[in-house]
Image: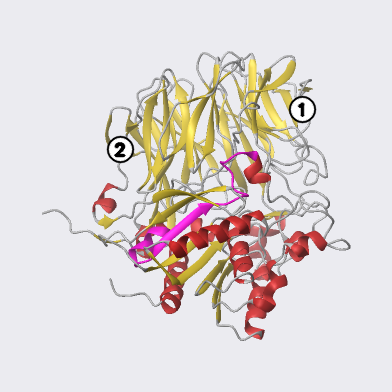
Amino acid sequence: MPTKKTAITPSDLTRLVIPYDPQLSPTGDLVTFTRKHTAGNATVSNIWAVSPDGGRSRQISSGDRDSQARFSPCGRRIAFLSYRDKERPQIRVLDRDGGESTAITDLPEGTLSMFAWAPDGASIAFVWRAADPERTTAATKAREAEGGSEPPRIATTPWYRLDGDGYFEQRRFVLKVVDVASGKARTVWAKDAMGFFTFDWSPDSRTLALTTNTNSRAMFDSNSDLLLLNVKTGRTKRLPGLPDGPKTNVRFSPCGKWLAWAGRAGDDGTYSVENLELFVCSATTGKAKSLSAKTDFCLMAAALGDSSEVAFAPSIRWTPDSRHVLARIGHHGAVQSMRFARSGRGTPEALTSGTKIHDQGNVVGKHMVLTVESPTRPSEVHIMPLAGGTPKRLTHCNDTLLRARHVAKPKAHWITSPDGNKVHVWMLTPPTRKSVRRAPAVLQVHGGPHAQYGCTFFHEFQCQAAEGYVVVYSNPRGSKGYGRDHCASIRGAWGTTDWTDIRAVADWMMARPEIDAKRMAIMGGSYGGYMTNWAIGQTNDFACAITDRCVSNLVSMAGNSDFMDKPWHYFDGNFWSDPEARWKSSPIRFAGKWKTPTLIIHSEGDLRCNVEQSEQVYSALQIRRIPSRFVRYPRSTSHGMSRGGPADLRQHRLGEILSWLGRYLKKRTR
């Protein structure tokens, strides 16, 4: 008998399986991917493999924290990053036909991020940062045995902490190369100021291309160099004819004659209202040109969700003939793989299509592997010909869950703000109702603000729709994916045209026959929390609000975030003697007008939007006797807790949200 479908619930996040980072073998006959799922309260990731013809996938690594599988150039071995020993990550290698893996590194405690095989298969380059010697396992045990206190943290540079990464003070990531046969590793680059450098091997394995910023004030000066590093001698060459500005995700062409990277001219970092462009240059003479300058595309238009790996960094791939570059482009809520001619001639061509999220894996021969996600299906691994065509699905990680659950399907709309701006809007209605009329509704506002909502499977939205709410989400001005001007409209002026668009969406909701205008809520996280705080200071139309990991005071925020706010840059002035622009855009300025019952959610370990931002909101609400509830998650959680935190806390958060909505929207029984 077919399974009777039931509603999606918060506990279903423990049943979701997320495959990502697919890699096609050099021989084209095997695809690896990282498969992430929840076991108990832990997030488990393993390396799995599947045939390009489809069929049953299989687990090939035995650790619970394995990821980033990469085939050796010959295709016989697979290297991967393993955190089996939590404090001592290593690069391990296994035979593609099976068997237990072996570690080729012997690293002490620290953090290991990305790595890449040299094309000759003899070496692997990797990014590494050693642990604080005062906080290693051995040092901590010795101190506790002697009854000593935890040592102080001492910072001497602007860059000393990062949300999700913690405090690292003066320690920095370095680039190392390990000899695969002997396991001997040596440092080849240690001058990057922040650790955001990227690298790629030349086809002859003699050179590493580097995008790196060596300025000690790199947080305030985003200009980076593109260097060629001779692996044997350590000498570097700076390529001429490149624009000043940020550069990242460098890639050698297969022929070795060209380099591609993402960047822009100017003093903004990679995260900006300006479009991040696709550049190419000669690997010997430089002389860069932008392949995307004539478009209005951005290589950093991330589509936000809570059920897959959110791809913020640019994705760049060369075709095997070195004549084209493939880049991931976010546009109108979808994400496509687009092909740009290296020559710069012609119009970029979309290899994928539809209202989906396509995230590029690697390219081998005439095929590319990728993951594909839609609003009604979580991410799965696919393969497709570079000549175009429909991607073929290879994995079926979530089929069992989807067969047992009702899934709401969004409908897209375009509305017009009072000043004529067009806003892209989606609406989810309760999936078990054949017709919906005058139901309570939730207006969701995305974070960033320079990102986008769109074609992701959003478990949180599905839970709310399953509980009988109409869920509305949109991409107001400030969002990526709709051109530079749409995004740049709010630079230095939050709470202006973005609020005009959100207000227009709320008015549209109130006029919809599906929605009860008196039972509407507004909510969002990060910048979405900012806009929630702003909205309740401008209108009393919402029956309740939920502000999550919010921004409330841009003056104090400027000095307590992991990314310090550069004076006279995004906002005019500074936060100590000339704070007017930041204060003008601060929602806390309107706290005297707040009347809306508000749930506040924040992680005490949030280094991006410090918990004091929510403390100000809660204090103002309590002083003014407005119904409010403050849910504080522990210091072990970060800004991204709703996407990647412990399963029990994520479920707790969803329960708090549904309880608050039920209390103030007075949900009718379905």
Camera sees residue 633: no
Q: Is residue 568 left or right of residue 533?
A: right
Residue 41 sits in which quadrant?
bottom left
SS state under label 1: loop
Q: Position of residue 645 (x, y in %)?
A: 50, 60
Residue at mark 2 to residue at mark 1: CA–CA distance: 45 Å
Q: Which residue is mark 2?
A: 57
Q: Which residues are magenta?
A: 461-484
Q: Which mark is residue 243?
A: 1
| Amino acid of disc 2 | Ser
Identify the residue at horizontal 76%, vertical 54% (top origin). Answer: 564
Q: Is residue 239 magenta?
A: no
SS state under label 2: strand
Q: How many marks?
A: 2
Residue 388 sits in which quadrant?
top left
Identify the residue at horizontal 46%, vertical 61% (top origin). Answer: 509
Camera sees residue 499: yes
